[in-house]
Image: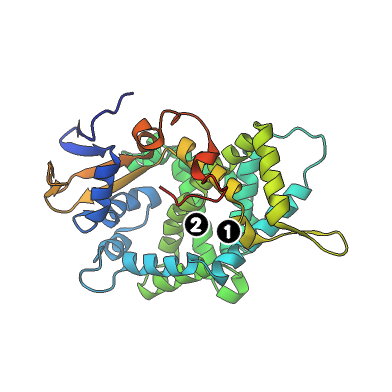
Amino acid sequence: LRCDLPIYTLRVLNSKIYVVTSPELISAVNRNSQALAFNPFVAQVGKRITGHDEQTSKIVQHNLNGEEGPGYVTDVHDRIVAALSPGKDLELMTETFLKEAWVSLNSLEAGKVVDLFAWTKDMVTMCSTRAIYGPTNPFNRNPGFVRSFWAFDHDLNFLIADIIPRLLAPVGYKARSDLAAAFAEYFRHYDPERAQSSAMIEARHHSNTQYGLTPWNQGCLEVGTLLGILANTIPSSFYMLVRLYTDPVLLEDVRAELEAVAINVTSDQTRVVEIMALRESCHLLNATWQELLRVHALGVGSRYVREDVLLNNQYRLEKGRVVQMPMAVLHSTPMVWGPDAHEFRPRRFMRESGTAKPPK
């Protein structure tokens, strides 16, 4: 597929979608965040994804961009950003995840062949939900919800289309309902200390309660949150393992880096991983992660056109349309990444000194 033009117009039934592929125009879209907004797009498709009721839709869609003071979406966004900013809350969540992952790794039997993707799905799901929601979360109570989530994710496009989803996507529809009911029960009895949940969930619950959302609708919205927690994290974790273990040289170099800067050995020969060092000093490990996201990420950034816009003083975008920015095109263009854009080369994210480059 050739994408030589900076922007395309796709006609879909009686509407239009603007597909932006050039870095210059993507920057222009991001700079024009009031006229080309993300929140209205999320609000439009949110109800189709999560199945919450009309009253909750009104709460979610009120004052989406904060022009009239506080609104649900801006309030949730600000609280989550604060909870996930570098600091003790994020470190505690990371520490909990890694401790759970360590238990999962130690449970593997030496010499036993495992389905790597299936194992990654189970491990990342259980460790992530434990770190974020605490030990009383629905996945901890019923590991079968791992299958439910992926059934929901598999049928997501049918649910978004919203054309008799109960009939056209019965498995995904039921999985969504089951997950929503389980999280509704979780929030019905939610207490931060008893739940031992992360600051992120405490912040979300505070906003949900403040704006009058019922436990059922909190459960519905949390199904949408699971997409952000799991849908991209699990494939990325899987590809990270695949890329490392299919490249002996890269694997050896990453291990050497970990030994040099991130692992301390105590007097009793216990090996301790320094979490902060993983992020700040393991430049090759982080470059591998960046390159993995460049090569494998297939997401699409979307914006809703709130008013007519002359993008970059050149392209007219009509009010009421949708702008989409496919990552795969931007991440594979030789104009940005050079002639080896289609190769997996982690060190493109590193300086000659061996330190990490700032993200592009």
Answer above or below: position of 307 versus 151.
below
Decide if residue 282 is on the left or right side of residue 28. right
Residue at point 28%, 73% (across, down): 70
Q: Quadrant of residue 12?
A: top left
206 and 318: which is toward the camera = 318
Q: Is residue 17 visible?
A: yes
* Residue that carries the numbered disc 2 in the rendered image: 181
Residue at point 33%, 23% (across, down): 1
The tag earlier along the polypeptide, 2 or 1, is 2
> Which class describes the residues within 10 Å of circle 1: few (<14), some (14-19), or many (20+)?
few
* Residue that carries the numbered disc 1 in the rendered image: 280
Answer above or below: position of 206 versus 136.
below
Q: Quadrant of residue 18?
A: top left
Answer above or below: position of 244 versus 313.
above
Residue type beneath disc 1? Glu
Contact between labelled residues 1 and 2, with CB atoms less than 8 Å apart: no
Residue at point 24%, 74% (across, down): 69
Measuring from the top left, give residue 227's x and y in whole percent: 46, 49
283 and 244: which is toward the camera = 283
Query: Which residue of the protein is positioned furthest toward the top in this rendering?
Result: 1
Residue type beneath disc 2? Ala
Measuring from the top left, give residue 170's x and y in whole percent: 44, 38
Which of discs 2 and 1 lies nearer the camera? The answer is 1
Decide if residue 280 is on the left or right side of residue 273. left
